[in-house]
Image (tube, rainbow, N blue to C red):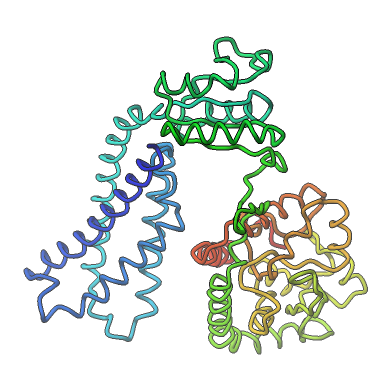
């Protein structure tokens, strides 16, 4: 089965990667000290080994190293490996900087350099071997299950087309059963009336039946299901409601009643919300105590010297469940009457010199960490819009209001994908909304960490859309 092989290759990659990492750490220590890292006197190194392993897990997840390992193109595979490796080095160096002055001083530069170099070499060598193994295995994994489709209407035809295009599902469709031969347009795929299905399947060793008949054929469907069970044939029903949208739906069962959700929402789960809120509180406290506390008087003084007006700019914006809240920023413009109506634009005459710098580096957003601490914002989420923009775009974009299922964020998936700053057209806003909805449906704690890391990186190197 393809899915089973995919899981196997993912597990193989993960296990060997960690073996390579730990062999590199242990071997480098032995070469440098002629003793084992596991020796009693050297056990102070073990926490460092643990930290290296945890950082690799974070780096590999951010780089999507273990996603779709069976089907991913070789170039993309190596690009993911390189991204993961350099993220790993960056996180290690950042961690060492934080630990300077603690007992971590015993990590020598030679140990750090040679262990990382050995790990990179062994990792690259292993990935070449893996790609060669995968190349030989992939061909043998195709067409592992033969199936028929009962019902050649639109649903059945769409299913057949999907299975043809996605060989990794492991299905090869032998043909259709339908009481109307004219419904099967492709020659050679019509196998007979629905009543002949079970007989054909038994004699030709078909392993699965996909039934796409409409609900009005409930009696026929039930009989097919019972006959399939009696003959040890897997039976799968494809309901018509798949066509409610152009993306997957999610089904929960309330007893025998299927309940359909049009999208996954990981943050509906209380545990996930608790994890996100805990991170929000911890991260916002860190920023307020260690960055805002000393940067605030400097920025406040320059803001007051450069132009008349308050240090902070407070604006009512659309929040969670479209509830308005006061969003705080450092004032980056001269006081003007259009601030609550008109977006900032490139080379906007209203923006002060310091304001232009703060907007490029996102320093103007620092006070929003108080919004996070209060609870009306999150570190990561859709950016909050002015009330007037919410009213305007909710009329123009069908899915616009869905983004308000989440708390607004200081940064978000849309921002790191380049959809920040001025929205000149409805299409610009639509792209931002699509990115926000992707985040809503794919949230994970590691995704939040990735977004925070990329936001910090973009602030340091500069973002052409920030102005």
Q: Position of residue 312 (x, y in %)?
A: 76, 83
Please tell me which residue is depicted at 84% across the width and 76% down the height of the picture. 334
- Relative to 456, say whether 160 is above or below: above
Q: Quadrant of residue 329?
A: bottom right
Q: Quadrant of residue 154?
A: top right
273 or 100, nearer to the observer: 273
303 or 61, nearer to the observer: 61
Q: Position of residue 457 (x, y in %)?
A: 53, 64
Image check: 282 left or right of 466? left
Spot the residue most to the top.
187
In which quadrant of the rendered image does the N terminus lie?
A: top left
Please tell me which residue is depicted at 15% across the width and 62% down the height of the picture. 27
Please tell me which residue is depicted at 69% across the width and 64% down the height of the picture. 382
Spot the residue most to the right.
337
60 or 172, nearer to the observer: 172
- Relative to 74, say whether 178 is above or below: above
Q: Quadrant of residue 44?
A: bottom left
Q: Position of residue 286 (x, y in %)?
A: 53, 83
Image check: 138 left or right of 255? left
- Relative to 213, say whether 62 is above or below: below
In which quadrant of the rendered image does the C terminus lie?
A: bottom right
How many numbered discs?
A: 0
Q: Position of residue 230 (x, y in %)?
A: 44, 34
134 or 286, nearer to the observer: 134
Image check: 404 left or right of 293? right
């Amino acid at each position: 089965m393809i899915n089973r092989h995919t899981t196997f290759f993912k597990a193989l990659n993960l296990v060997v990667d960690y073996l390579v990492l730990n062999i590199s750490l242990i071997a480098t220590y032995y070469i440098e000290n002629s003793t084992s890292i596991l020796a009693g006197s050297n056990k102070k190194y073990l926490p460092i080994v643990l930290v290296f392993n945890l950082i690799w897990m974070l780096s590999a997840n951010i780089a999507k190293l273990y996603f779709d390992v069976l089907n991913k193109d070789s170039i993309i595979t190596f690009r993911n490996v390189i991204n993961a490796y350099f993220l790993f080095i960056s996180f290690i160096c950042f961690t060492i900087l934080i630990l300077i002055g603690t007992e971590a001083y015993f990590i020598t530069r030679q140990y750090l350099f040679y262990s990382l170099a050995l790990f990179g070499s062994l990792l690259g060598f292993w990935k070449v071997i893996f790609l060669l193994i995968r190349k030989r295995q992939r061909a043998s994994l195709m067409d592992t299950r033969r199936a028929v489709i009962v019902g050649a209407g639109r649903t059945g035809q769409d299913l057949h087309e999907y299975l043809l295009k996605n060989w990794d599902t492991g299905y090869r469709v032998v043909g259709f059963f339908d009481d109307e031969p004219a419904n099967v347009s492709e020659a050679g795929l019509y196998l007979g009336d629905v009543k002949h299905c079970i007989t054909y399947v038994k004699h030709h060793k078909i392993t699965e039946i996909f039934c796409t008949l409409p609900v009005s054929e409930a009696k026929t469907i039930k009989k097919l299901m019972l006959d399939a069970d009696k003959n040890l044939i897997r039976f799968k029903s494809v309901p018509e409601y798949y066509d409610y949208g152009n993306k997957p739906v999610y089904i929960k069962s309330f007893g025998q009643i299927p309940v359909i959700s049009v999208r996954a929402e990981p943050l509906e789960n209380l545990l996930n919300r608790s994890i996100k809120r805990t991170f929000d509180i911890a991260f916002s406290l860190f920023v307020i105590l260690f960055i805002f506390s000393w940067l605030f008087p400097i920025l406040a003084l320059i803001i007051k010297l450069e132009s008349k007006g308050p240090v902070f700019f407070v604006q009512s914006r659309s929040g969670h469940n479209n509830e308005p809240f006061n969003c705080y920023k450092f004032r980056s413009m001269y006081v003007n009457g259009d601030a609550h109506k008109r977006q900032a634009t490139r080379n906007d005459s209203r923006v002060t010199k310091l304001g232009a710098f703060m907007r490029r580096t996102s320093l103007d957003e620092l006070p929003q960490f108080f919004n996070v601490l209060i609870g009306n914002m999150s570190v990561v989420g859709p950016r909050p819009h002015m009330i007037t923009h919410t009213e305007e775009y909710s009329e123009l974009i069908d899915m616009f209001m869905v983004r308000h299922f989440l708390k607004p964020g200081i940064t978000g998936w849309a921002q790191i994908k380049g959809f920040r700053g001025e929205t000149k057209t409805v299409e610009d806003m639509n792209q931002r909304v699509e990115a926000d909805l992707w985040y809503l449906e794919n949230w994970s704690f590691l995704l939040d960490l990735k977004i925070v890391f990329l936001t910090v990186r973009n602030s340091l190197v500069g973002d052409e859309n920030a102005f």
